[in-house]
Image (tube, grey):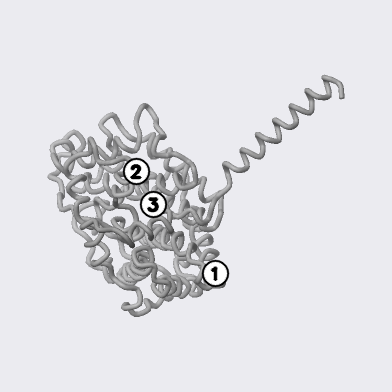
Amino acid sequence: MSSYEMNILGILVASLAVALSAQAQHGIDPYASVVDVAARQAALKSTSDPLLRAAIKGLNSCIAIPLVAPPSGRMIIPHHYLSGSSGPVNPAEGPATRVYGMFESRITAGMNQYLATGSHAEAACALAQLDAWAQARALLDYDREESSQAWYQVEWTLSSSAITESVLVNDSTLDPVQQKRVIAWLDTASRKDISQEKPGDTNNNHHYWRALGATSVGVVASDDKLFQFGVKTYKEAISEIDSNGAFPKEMARHENATHYQGFALQPLVLIAQLAARQGVDLYAYQVNGHTLRDAIVFFGRAVDDSKLIKPYTGDAQNLHFGGADYAPFAFYVARFGDDGLPPAIVNGLKHPSGATRIGGSTTIMAAK
């Protein structure tokens, strides 16, 4: 073989290697849940940590909760606020959304129990609950123009469902027919969810929640389009962080500005965590020198000192925060530690925390 032919062959081999490498980078591992399931189960089984023991003791049981029947008919949900995007809450919303909260609580209870105790019965309960809604084609009969609040509810319940399923797919004892049906339903629901977006949308925290649904479904369904939608949205969110670490669109929420800063962080932390499990480091992604950490630190500092919100709004802040507000940071602290984080976050994570929209007990899923 001539030197020219050898050079050509070398170029072809190198090109093939690059192509294969690129293909591998874009491959999705559907079993890489938000956590390493086997490792987490082993850690929880042998833990003597008081926080983890308290979280395990406080878990609900899917088996002990009756099946939550899927809602029937068109999804019509009253607006959360009586007027605009702040102020008094609409009392009509709660009854309309109760069924979705019950559903999220039941599926995450079963998944959390499976992580904490290894109970296949709890995992099967959670999957059966998901399958009941999959067979009823829940979360699909709505339109944002008719009920924007229904659209918002879909993104939250979809995120809860897909994160739950991302753990359940690791249980080989579960019914594969149910698994396939649930994953197909989640994929259809997520694709409809993001298809409702329009040019000119404000793309505040709701955009991030839809992205979490897409990212988590993208993982379990090996749907690269959905996964990449989540990655793209995350990067858009980081580009919006201002010099203080705030999300300006959330700062426009008057008395709830601090709350919505934290609320926007819930899906973003989970997207970063899911991406990290796929070998994509979004935690380190930065724009204008800002990363996700800046937004986390600003939230904690604002909880500790509400005067930090004064440049954005003169409204006195609603400062009632609990475990759900600190829940996503269990993943961040497990990865990076709590050095340099504001006291509000450090102290908030000293107690079991969780939110059904991000998989239930994040203490169970992530705390060390």
Write down the quadrant of residue 26 in the picture.
top right
Give the mark nearer the N terminus: 1 vs 3: 1
Mark in the foreground, 1 or 2: 2
How far is mark 2 from mark 3, CA to CA? 22 Å
Other residues around mark 2 within 10 Å, as few (<14) / some (14–19) / many (≥20) = some
Report the mark closest to the observer, 2 or 3: 2
Q: Secondary structure at mark 3?
A: helix
* 222 versus 95 height, above or below: above
Relative placement, left or right, of 308 versus 324 is: left
Which residue is nearer to you in this view: 123 or 162? 123
Q: In the picture provided, is 54 more to the left or to the right than 247?
A: left
The residue tagged with tag 1: helix, strand or loop? helix
Helix, strand or loop under label 2: helix
Mark closer to the chain start, 1 or 2: 1
| Quadrant location, the N terminus | top right
Which residue is painted at 39% across and 72% down in the image? Answer: 122
The amino acid marked with disc number 2 is Arg
Mark 1–mark 2 Cα distance, whole angstroms, equals: 33 Å
From mark 1 to mark 3, how far is it between C-alphas? 23 Å
Q: Is residue 368 visible?
A: yes
User: Residue 109, how many percent across, how many down?
Assistant: 33, 68
Query: Is the C-beta separation of discs 1 and 2 under 8 Å?
Result: no
| Residue for badge 1 | 181
The quadrant where residue 304 appears: top left
Pointer 2: what residue? Answer: 335
